[in-house]
Each structure stands twice: as C-alpha cells, then as structure tokens.
C-alpha cells in the first residue's frame, strides 16, 4: 500500500485540481468570514475593515513574493535561471497565503486561526505542485522523497570473473559489437537495468555520492559485447539519478534497445558535484575539490575496468543539463581523445558559481587567466580542430539566457570543425520538460554517431 501511495502522480489533474480548489475555497472563506459573522458583534465588531485588511494582506504578500523573486532571481541571479511567469505567479500566491495567515493569527479567533493555517498549507502545497509542473521535475511522490531509488551493486573488475548477468559486465575478451552481426543470445534479459554503484575517488580524493549506471540488455548477458558508453551529468543542484528519475534517459534507451536486439549505449552518471548545494564547476580547485580529475580520471578508468565498453572516442559520448552541460562541453572539448560525441542541454557559456569574482576566487585561485581558459569556447579555440566530433545542442524556446549561450558555443564549435545540430524544445524554459524533449529528439543522432544503428524520429 505504501508503494502505491508513493507512486501517486502529482502532475495530473486528479491531484492538482482538488488541491487548487481546496486552497481557493479555504482562502476565500478566511477572507469573507467576518461578513458572515456580522450578527455577532462580539466576534466581528468591524467586519468590513477585517475583510479589507485581509484582502490587503493578500495583495501585499503577493507583491512581496514577486519582489523577492525579482531580487533573488533577476538582480542577484542566485539560481542561475530566469523564472517563468508561471513560477512567479505561484510564488506570489504562496507569499499571499502566508501574509493572510499572519493577519488572521493577529486578529484572533482560534477556530479561524486553525482554518487559516490549513488554508496557508493548501496554498503552499498548490504553489509547490504548480512550480513542480512548470519545472517538470517530480512526477510522483516517490521521486520527491527518494533521492536515489536504485539498488546498489558492486560490479567486479574483469579479473574477478565467474558471475553472470548484470554483475558480470566484463570487458575482457569481448569483441566490439558489430550491429550487423549481432544477434540477441538465448536468455538475454528483455529489459535493461538501472543500479547504483560506488566509484571511488582513487586519484582525485573527491567525495562523491553514488553513481548511477544503466545497463542495456546486451550488457547483461554472460558474454557481453563491447558497447558505446554515455557519461551523464546532472544539473546543479542535483544528483546522479536526476537524468533517470526526471529526465527519463533510461526509458528512452529502453525504447531504442527494444527494437535493436538489446543494443544501446551503456550510461554512467557520476557525481561531479559532491552534494546538491555544491558546485565545483568541473574543475580542480583547492577550495572545491578535484571534480575534473574525478570525472576524467577516476570515473573514466572505472568505466574501462568494470564495464564492457569500446575504447575509441567514436564510441564515447557525454550528456549533461545546465551545469552538467557546461561540464560536458568542458570535458569533451578538452579531451577529444576520450569523447567524440556531446549532447549539451542548456549549457552555460562557462563555469559559474555565483558572481564572476566569486567564481574566480572559488574555482581558480583568483586567476582571471585560468578562469577564461576554462570556458568551453576558449578550450575549443585552443585545441583548434575537431574533425570527427558531433555536438548536439538543445535549449527551451522560452529560455532566453541559455538560447544566447548555446548560440555562442555552437558558433565556436562549428568554427573549429565540429558537426553540430540544434534542438529547441517548444514552449519550455530552463526545466526538465526541455531535458526530456531534447533527449527524446537528440539521442537518435547521438546513438548513431556512437556507432549503433540509426533510428528515425524521436525516442
């Protein structure tokens, strides 16, 4: 029963409409109840004034909410995104409900205070659900409470041998897959598997959370072929499971594997952040840790030692969203000997952690030159030529800042010889609706460039 409750969708009308209606009814009742008590002078000596004060509280609270969003989001840019009108509206509603609650707590009446508390809670819940729908993040209760729901496994290094299935993904002795010659062996699982693994920071000493790995059916056989691999990086704040729980990356690849005899890229999502609130910017720094070394040395070596993956850069790709997309651009531009394919969804123009001054101090030891050199455009320009590299860019139609950064990065990428394409998600902004759209429409080109059969349309 608990499992069923956790799987209740929180983005559909069955939940949103009742919560919104209840919030509206309770709020209206709290506002107009003095007029209903006009006959009881002990309880409502000045009913009209009480209503006016409560309406004024709603207006002031909503205005304060809009100012707070403008100041923190537009002026200080604390979140790195421009909030949509829908999100601004819901934040204004939430602040209006809080302001009304404060007024009622002062004006008195214990029954009314309890109802006002319930109204404020419903308004806050409605606002939270509304913002969640706008950002396209949590689809059900389980996603909101479980940070990483995938079972933890230990994938042995090749010399351990002996096991079969998901725990026996051994690259030793495996031939690189040739899709034309591949036939699904008897007993191959019908579905892929998503697991959590610990990738130690052996060289970097970076304190990372558990990574998430998706194994296609072909990788779960007793003698798996060498497959392409995608390294996936979340946004910030975020966690490795985000691309699977919210971005549906595993589901899109499952669809591909279903029609290609179990073949699909293996996906490894390491933790380049260390914690949701941290942003090491995928560089090595004294203050934020060696995030770059963790991904490009510890993670890459772990993948090669524990998974049946091809070794050539033509079979390696990297995908990311927002901060993760910036990291993907940094890593793929700086290491074309590792990655030959990139999918960058809403990439920033360069590493960022707060203001430019704060970014330079935290990530680059105060060196302006090092900060400028770490920008993807600077890395691409310094390298000079990428004759066999594909970069698929994507952003939301209503995401003006990332539209500009994407256009700038794409111009540089094409100037240095990269193949590029652009996917624009209609009617979305800097949110997970954009991520899902770009993944669905961008993965076919990425998969084909990684050496697997092309597929028509979106996944």
Image (cartoon, rainbow, N blue to C red):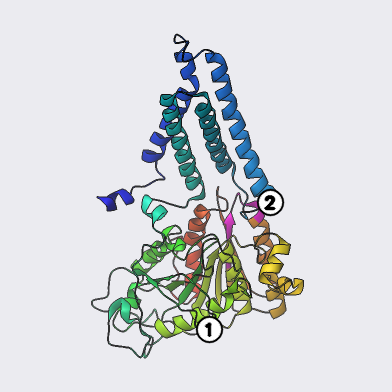
Secondary structure of the residue carrying numbered label 1: loop
Please give left or right for residue 220 compared with residue 50 in the image. Answer: left
Q: Nearer the viewer, residue 430 or 381?
A: 430
Residue 248 drawn above or below residue 202: above
Q: Is residue 3 visible?
A: yes
Distance from Cα at disc 1 to Cα at disc 2: 36 Å
Q: Earlier in the sequence, mark 1 or mark 2?
A: 2
In the image, the segment drawn in magenta is 392-401
| Callout 1 touching callout 2 (CB < 8 Å) | no
Label 2 sits on residue:
76
Q: Position of residue 359 (x, y in %)?
A: 68, 65
Residue 223 drawn above or below residue 91: below
Q: Quadrant of residue 214?
A: bottom left
Please give left or right for residue 180 compared with residue 66 in the image. Answer: left
The structure residue drawn at horizontal position 43% and vertical position 85%, both measured from the top left corner, is: 305
Task: Rate crowding at label 2 as few (under 14), some (14 to 19) or many (20 or more) other CA atoms within 10 Å.
Answer: few
Decide whether residue 397 is among the magenta residues.
yes
Q: Quadrant of residue 154?
A: bottom left
Residue 230 drawn above or below residue 46: below
Q: Position of residue 432 (x, y in %)?
A: 50, 54
Secondary structure of the residue carrying numbered label 2: loop
Task: Rate crowding at label 1 as few (under 14), some (14 to 19) or many (20 or more) other CA atoms within 10 Å.
Answer: few
Label 1 sits on residue:
203
Q: Nearer the viewer, residue 101 or 418?
A: 101
Q: Is residue 387 visible?
A: no
Q: Quadrant of the C terminus?
A: bottom left
Q: Position of residue 141 (x, y in %)?
A: 37, 50
């Amino acid at each position: 029963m608990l499992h069923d409750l956790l799987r209740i969708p929180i983005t559909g009308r069955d939940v949103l409409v009742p919560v919104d209606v209840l919030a509206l009814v309770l709020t209206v009742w709290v506002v107009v109840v003095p007029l209903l008590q006009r006959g009881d002078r002990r309880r409502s000596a000045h009913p009209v004034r009480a209503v006016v004060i409560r309406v004024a509280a709603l207006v002031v609270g909503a205005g304060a909410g809009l100012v707070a969003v403008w100041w923190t989001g537009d002026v200080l840019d604390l979140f790195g995104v421009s909030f949509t009108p829908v999100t601004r509206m819901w934040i204004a509603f939430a602040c209006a409900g809080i302001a009304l609650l404060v007024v009622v707590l002062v004006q008195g009446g214990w029954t009314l205070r309890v109802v006002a508390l319930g109204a404020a809670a419903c308004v806050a819940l409605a606002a939270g659900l509304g913002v969640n729908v706008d950002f396209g993040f949590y689809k059900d209760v389980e996603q909101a409470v479980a940070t990483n729901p995938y079972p933890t496994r230990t994938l042995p290094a090749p010399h351990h041998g002996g096991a079969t299935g998901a725990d026996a993904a051994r690259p030793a002795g495996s031939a690189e897959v040739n899709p034309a010659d591949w036939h699904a062996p008897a007993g191959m699982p019908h579905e892929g598997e998503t697991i959590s693994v610990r990738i130690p920071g052996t060289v970097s000493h970076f304190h990372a959370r558990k990574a998430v790995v998706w194994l296609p059916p072909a990788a779960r056989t007793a003698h798996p072929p060498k497959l392409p691999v995608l390294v996936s990086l979340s946004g910030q704040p975020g966690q490795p499971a985000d691309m699977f729980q919210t971005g549906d990356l595993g589901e899109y690849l499952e669809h591909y594997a279903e029609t290609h005899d179990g073949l699909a890229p293996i996906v490894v999502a390491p933790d380049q952040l260390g914690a949701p609130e941290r942003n090491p910017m995928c560089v090595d720094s004294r203050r934020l840790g060696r995030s770059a070394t963790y991904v490009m040395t510890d993670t890459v070596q772990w993948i090669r030692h524990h998974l049946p993956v091809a070794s050539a850069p033509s079979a390696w790709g990297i995908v990311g969203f927002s901060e993760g997309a910036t990291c993907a651009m940094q890593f793929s531009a700086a290491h074309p000997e590792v990655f030959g394919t990139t999918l960058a969804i809403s990439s920033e123009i360069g590493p960022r952690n707060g203001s430019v001054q704060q970014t330079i101090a935290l990530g680059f030891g105060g060196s302006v030159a090092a900060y400028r050199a770490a920008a993807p455009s600077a890395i691409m320009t310094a390298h000079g030529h990428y004759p066999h590299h594909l970069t698929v860019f994507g952003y939301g139609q209503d995401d003006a800042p990332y539209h500009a950064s994407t256009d700038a990065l794409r111009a540089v990428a094409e100037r240095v010889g990269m193949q590029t394409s652009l996917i624009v998600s209609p009617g979305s902004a800097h949110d997970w609706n954009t991520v899902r759209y770009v993944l669905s429409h961008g993965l076919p080109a990425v998969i084909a460039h990684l050496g697997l059969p092309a597929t028509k349309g979106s996944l």
